[in-house]
Amino acid sequence: MKSIDERRLESDLDYRFGYLTEFVGFGEGDIAAIHAAAPHLAPLVPALVDAVYDKLFSYDATWRHFLPRQSGYEGAVPTNLRELTQDHEQIQFRKQHLGRYLVALVTRPYDAKMVAYLDRVGQIHTPKAGSEQLDVPLVQMNALMGFVADALNATIQGLGLDLDAERRTVRAFSKLLWLQNDLINRHYQAA
């Protein structure tokens, strides 16, 4: 039986990620499968981003979180949901961020820098980072991650990969998104 320092899981990001990757079995083979999918998935990133934003736009409970100024965005800020169309430049700004995130998942090495990036993704959706006005409830983040997981799975299954490669890729992304979800959820815990 391996001994785990549970307090350290809460204070040491690399230790936490190492434990989680070992526990779920996310390893070099999974990273290789994710990276191998990059040439197939890269051209589909804009469609994935649009699908995510179409889903977010369909609920006021998710769309309202795009009203406050987004960290790094310098343009005009909408004052109400009617003004916040999918063509609004703040939404275009956010879509670019999501596109870069998806590209990062399939291209970057899974090193300490990437772990910090994945952790930051969780943090920026809370007042702890980015905009103090941005406080996306955990239920909305979980709904989003569930949608993204399903959209990625459907996309992978439509790539025409051989069955073994498809299975490896779906399993690798499934593990990765569970890891990402943990790095989101940890920022919602009471201090």
Image: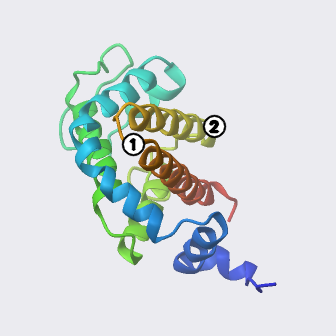
What is the quadrant of the C terminus in the image?
bottom right
Given this view, does label 1 or label 2 mark the residue nearer the observer?
1
> Can residue 67 be seen in the rendering of this structure?
no
Residue 179 screen position, x and y as percent: 56, 59
Residue depicted at 61% across the width and 43% down the height: 138
Residue depicted at 54% across the width and 50% down the height: 171
Q: Image quadrant of residue 6?
A: bottom right
The Cα–Cα distance between marks 1 and 2, rounded to whole angstroms, is 36 Å
Report the front residue among 23 and 89.
Answer: 23
Q: Secondary structure at mark 2?
A: helix
Residue 39 screen position, x and y as percent: 23, 48
Q: Which circle marks residue 162 in the picture?
A: 1
Q: Is residue 58 above or below residue 178?
A: above
Report the front residue among 135 and 164.
Answer: 164
Q: Which circle marks residue 19 in the picture?
A: none
Q: Is residue 157 above or below residue 26?
A: above
Q: Which residue is mark 2?
A: 139
